[in-house]
Image (spheres, rainbow, N blue to C red):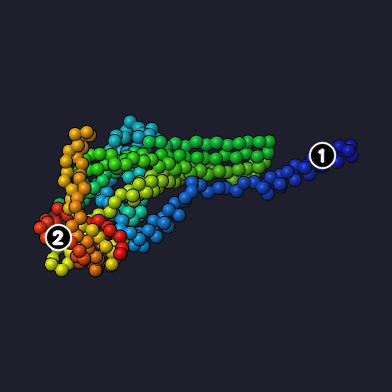
Amino acid sequence: MIKSRRASRRLVAVALAAASTGCAVQTPPITPKEPAPALAVQRAAQQSYASQPPVSPVLKRKIALGRITNETNYGRSLLRDQHGDPLGKQVSDLLSKALSESGAYLVFERPDIGRLRDEAQLTGDAQALIGVNLLVIGSLTEFGRKTVGESGFVSASKKQVAFAKVDLRLVDVQTAQIVFATSGAGEASTETASTFGFGSQAGYDGTLNDTAIRQAVADATSRLTTALASQPWQTYILKAEPNRVFLGGGKTQGIREGMQFEVFTQGEQVKSPQTGAVVTLPGRRVADLRIDGLFGNTELDEGSVASIVSGSLAGYKLEQLVVRHGGAR
């Protein structure tokens, strides 16, 4: 009898020790995880980029969102048509926000342009819409969730994972040519664990969907910006006087006093018999300019004042000339 009681006490002690040990080392609740670089790091980098003038001129391309739809089975039903696409609208809004915050584009509204037109008609104001160079078209092509877990003799864990993938392409509005295509992926997860029934418990976490989509959009935007950054910068002459030349583009595009620019004639455009596409031939260099000052208050109305240091613009129409960065000298 005494041995039996001692054995029972030992079993109870072992169980209590295991329980206390399990509770001490149980995995705490894990907040939603994002692949590096995190969104906070990307936002900080974007804000730093937007607040500091670029080292060399950076062409801010005029861009607008076209069709951004949900092509997955998630969120679809017989009661919703292509116009009732909340997930596609969410991707559009996130993409518009990401492009604007990047500081690399002039983003113009297109998905809700009908509402802007209606508002202008109510107030009697005439719209002065600005055309864009590139149109972003794409869709949410992959989206899903899964729950995985492990269970042992005294412990169990459950992990919720959400995954999203966004496919985008840039289309030249003049030629309808696809200039660039890319994809962005994002994943978010949360994990809970318990030992002997003690530990954290969690139900369905809907915020993981938003985090995964936001990460996918940020990834695609980063890839798109990197690709367009390699495109050559150029601008045009707004007006030419005997002693001054006014150029489009100013501080936000990285133009500073003392910079040197080269003026070229716009090359002749000919149709290639090989591809059937229009090819622009190289132009001739006619003058060199030096930036003397800047003007304007916003990205749309800013410009630069330059003087001619060599060559001449005489005999040329302004619309026949293009200005390119020649490096500081």
The mark tally for this picture is 2
Nearest the eye: 187 or 265: 265
Above/below status of 300 relative to 195: below
Residue 165, by quadrant, is: top left
Nearest the eye: 79 or 190: 190
Quadrant location of the C terminus?
A: bottom left
Could one spot residue 251 in this view of the protein?
no
x 41%, y 56%: residue: 45
Answer with left or right where residue 244 lies relative to residue 47.
left
Q: Position of residue 96 (x, y in %)?
A: 32, 49
x 28%, y 64%: residue: 259
Answer with left or right where residue 174 lies relative to residue 228.
left
Q: Position of residue 161 (x, y in %)?
A: 50, 40
**Alpha carbons under labels 2 and 1: distance apart:** 103 Å
Check disc 2 and report the residue beneath it.
313
Q: Position of residue 300 (x, y in %)?
A: 23, 58
Nearest the eye: 257 or 72: 257
Q: Residue furthest left?
A: 315
Mark 2, other Cα within 10 Å: few <14 / some 14–19 / many ≥20:
many
Q: Residue furthest right?
A: 2
Check disc 1 and report the residue beneath it.
8
x 82%, y 42%: residue: 9
x 47%, y 50%: residue: 37
Among the two numbered marks 2 and 1 on one chain, the one whose residue lies closer to the N terminus: 1
Q: Which residue type carries mark 2?
A: Leu
Q: Secondary structure at mark 2?
A: loop
Q: Which residue type carries mark 1?
A: Ser
Above/below status of 115 relative to 4: below
Mark 1, other Cα within 10 Å: few <14 / some 14–19 / many ≥20:
few
Q: Secondary structure at mark 1?
A: helix
